[in-house]
Amino acid sequence: MCTSRTLRRAVREVLAVALSLALIPIAAHAEPLVPGTGQKLDQVGDDFEDERWEYRFHLPKSTRDVDQQDRFPAGEAGNGRWYEGILRGQPDVVKRVPTPASGLPGSRGSLLLQSLWTGVPGQPQNVLSQDDLIADVNYRLQGAIPAAMSPSVVVRVFLPPVATWENRTGPHFGFRIAVETRGVQQPGTPFSLSRSDVETYWPGMFIEFQAKTSENENCYAHLRVRANENGYDFRSRQISATGWWTLGMSVTGDGMIHYYASPGVDDLTPADYLGSLYPYGYRAHAFKTFFFNICSGDDGRNWSTAWIIDDPSVYVVR
């Protein structure tokens, strides 16, 4: 197993090569990479097995997206692996809980994420809003992971019974990554960069709910992928059952993002493939981190759906 120092040195060496090639057009696309391929990085991610696991809130939370207020110090996990998103603030509940039935074998702890106030606490906006919990990857590794190392991230997500979901049509949960592009754009797309720009963008997957509006309709959920080359989200796989699901995303050396999802907690396979995209027409050159969105209608009365995650993990191909 690599030491933290060895891994950081390897990341720096590969990053130097990747940056030297950043402006060279890539003639062929890489094959889709199944998330979870390669070496797991123990320095990042979490298994929530420590019974002393805690989150320190440091309230009030930040709400820069609503009222331009950054409130420090930010919330953070006691183990240093998670922190509050300053743009939108942390979920109102970030709590270690017993792993629901049929979870990963041997898992005793998972993480509950839920919010009542997804905007400014005590000031309901009555519009779709969200909170963010961000994994500390970039800082713990002392730099982003080059796309040349084929980084990927996998998480298990527990979907509670439909009767307990917030009764609202729209996105309820997001699983996203932060990646960098460096002045390279797919031809024919509307998002332009100069050759010297460094831009961070946030591909991902959302769990969307369609609430029934009459007794004759059924409610259902599906995955929505962000985003295609023109920056538009699109509907992907329908969610056929609640309980545990495994979600994953990978980045390959050509800068493509690859999306995978499967019911259950088994490792992802090629059969779980949803698609491959250059979101916004950008090629990713480095993977910075991953994070989760908790969404609600922010009415001050109804809690968001209660989401439970387990064993979010980052992998690289050496």
Image (tube, grey):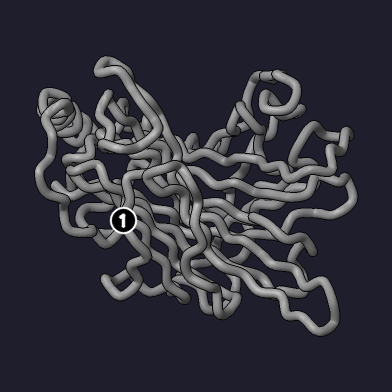
Quadrant hosting residue 33? bottom left
Image-based side of 188 in relation to 98, left or right? left
**Percent x, y of residue 175:** 50, 51
Query: Residue drawn 79% across and 31% down?
Result: 120
Image-based side of 70 in relation to 184, left or right? right
Above or below, 204 against 264 in this view is above
Query: Residue drawn 69% across and 34% down?
Result: 57
**Percent x, y of residue 136:** 44, 35
Label 1 SS: strand
Quadrant hosting residue 78? top right
Tag 1 residue = 276
Q: Residues within 10 Å of mark 1 (few under 14, many from 20)?
A: some
Query: Residue drawn 76% across and 27% down?
Result: 60
**Percent x, y of residue 37:** 23, 59
Along the viewing direction, whichever of 60 and 196 lies nearer the viewer: 196
Query: Residue drawn 25% across and 18% down?
Result: 195
Image-based side of 141 in relation to 102, left or right? left
Residue 290 seen in the figure = no
Above or below, 71 against 119 in this view is above
Amino acid type, callout 1:
Ser
Image-based side of 312 in relation to 13, left or right? right
**Percent x, y of residue 137:** 39, 36
Residue placed farthest to the front in the image?
A: 188
Quadrant hosting residue 200? top left
Residue 34 seen in the figure = yes
